[in-house]
Image (cartoon, rainbow, N blue to C red):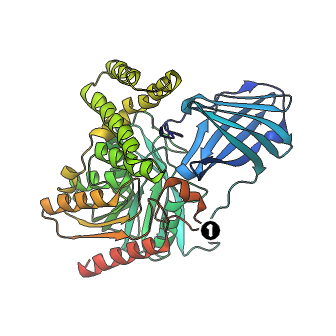
Amino acid sequence: MKPIAFFLLLFICLSPLISQEKTLPEISGKWTGSLLIQNSKLRLVFNFTSHGNAISGTIDSPDQGAKGIPAKEVIFRNDSVIVNVPVIMGQYKAVLTTKTSMRGTWYQKGMSIPLNIDKSSGMEVLQLIPSNPLYDSKEVKIVNQKTGVTLAGTLTTPKNAKNCPAVILVSGSGPQKRDEELMGQKPFYRIANYLSERGIAVLRYDDRGVNESTGNFQTATSFDFADDAELAFAFLRKQPGIDPEKVGIIGHSEGAMIAPIVASRNKEVAFIILLAGPGITGREILITQTEAMLLGQGFVKDSAMKISNLNKEIMDIVENNQNDKDAKNLIKQKIEKMNFPEKEKEDYTKSFSIYLTPWFRTFIAFDPAPYLSQVKCAVLVLNGSKDVQVVPKQNLAGIEKALKKGQNSNYEIIELQGYNHLFQESQTGMPAEYSNIQKPVMDNKVLEITEAWIKKYFHSEGK
């Protein structure tokens, strides 16, 4: 069995190209359906937009947190639809059976899977937006005079705020808007709403090059995002009603990797909260993540280890060859020696090219331990026991080891039983399950722990 590498290129955002075909206004809108893969459902959302005599499209994979994957072309002829998505080596062919239904097949990496999609108003959003929030909200712009990058964000402050604590929110990997939107939900909005209603100011912002923020996301690494977070932190400390001595950072996933970078070099950071954060190297994260997901998908251990070993060998090539051209040739040679069909060899070679991007090269080599060992502020660490993306056993142990090495005893580590990477109570923790859980991400228990810890910390410290 080979891995199902759907939407591997989550970090790439390209502008969709438009095919010149006849105008069909009724196709515009959202069309949803599910792929059945190894007894798990993977939802896809096709977003079609009519442009006079042409149609453009993007695809969302809400169960994997992927949004806006560009279709190179959308072709519509005599009720037949073809959607070409080369960035993930995918294609959808279907027939429009009614004005609101398409019946067809999804093709990717040598596989063909039936996929029927229906026009809809979009997926249910498990998000309740209060009509009269108990806080003030304003849009802000944060300008980096050195780089020219401007971060656009939202600052929420308690009503009549006076010397209140505050946090910035730092998102996980991939191009994220300020609410870290996925699966029709907004986890960072949930955090901001909950905390600001309870006396804690929150600043959340679009990643550089995303939505209203300027800059280039494609060439940025985690260290660039750390610079952005530190800029946002400095901005927040200067805002009216906020006590500059009570400002911290909450990071989720990659954001929980960035928070210690900032705290290790900026002693003004009062505290950090790491949600599903890494405690081992990026290389080790990918290895444990790959093995956990493959086993969770039903792969036998020998097959899972074969794929994991190939992944390790590709990472060796990337780490030992800084020249992209040389690394790409070596990856191709490695794949050529594998016992794969010729078409799959080509697909694997293209898939592994993501390892050569600036972000991925940095991530593979990144070790959080030196930064965690230099963090002297208070630290709260939360991880779900069923997280298969940042596996708790290795990562929580790594975080604690590094904090102890730095002689920081002011920390608390909590493994939340039954929670997945998005902090939902789950059965398996697998990404394919995310959309089937009829509960919001960032469960209320996580929000309650976060609020109580921040308030307890400042009370016990007499701040």
Q: Nearer the viewer, residue 407 or 267?
A: 407
- Quadrant of the image occupied by residue 199: bottom left
Q: Is residue 423 left or right of residue 37?
A: left
Relative image position of residue 333 (x, y in whole percent): 36, 19
* Residue pictured at 29% horizontal, 46% vertical: 284
Q: Nearer the viewer, residue 336 or 256?
A: 336
Q: Nearer the viewer, residue 68 or 241?
A: 68
Relative image position of residue 445 (x, y in whole percent): 45, 75
User: Taking 60 as reference, is 374 above or below it?
Assistant: below
* Residue pictured at 31% horizontal, 79% vertical: 456
Q: Residues within 10 Å of mark 1 (few under 14, many from 20)?
A: few
Residue matched to label 1: 129
* Residue pictured at 65% horizontal, 27% vertical: 17
Q: Is residue 261 left or right of residue 253?
A: left
User: Taking 290 as reference, is 139 above or below it?
Assistant: below
* Residue pictured at 62% horizontal, 74% vertical: 132
Q: Is residue 265 left or right of residue 125?
A: left
- Quadrant of the image occupied by residue 398: bottom left
Label 1 amino acid? Ile
Relative image position of residue 221 (x, y in whole percent): 36, 39
Q: How many marks?
A: 1
Residue 123 visible from this viewpoint: yes
Q: Is residue 93 left or right of residue 257?
A: right
Relative image position of residue 334 (x, y in whole percent): 35, 24
Q: Nearer the viewer, residue 196 or 175?
A: 175
Residue 172 visible from this viewpoint: no
Q: Secondary structure at mark 1?
A: loop
User: Taking 185 as reference, is 20 above or below it?
Assistant: above
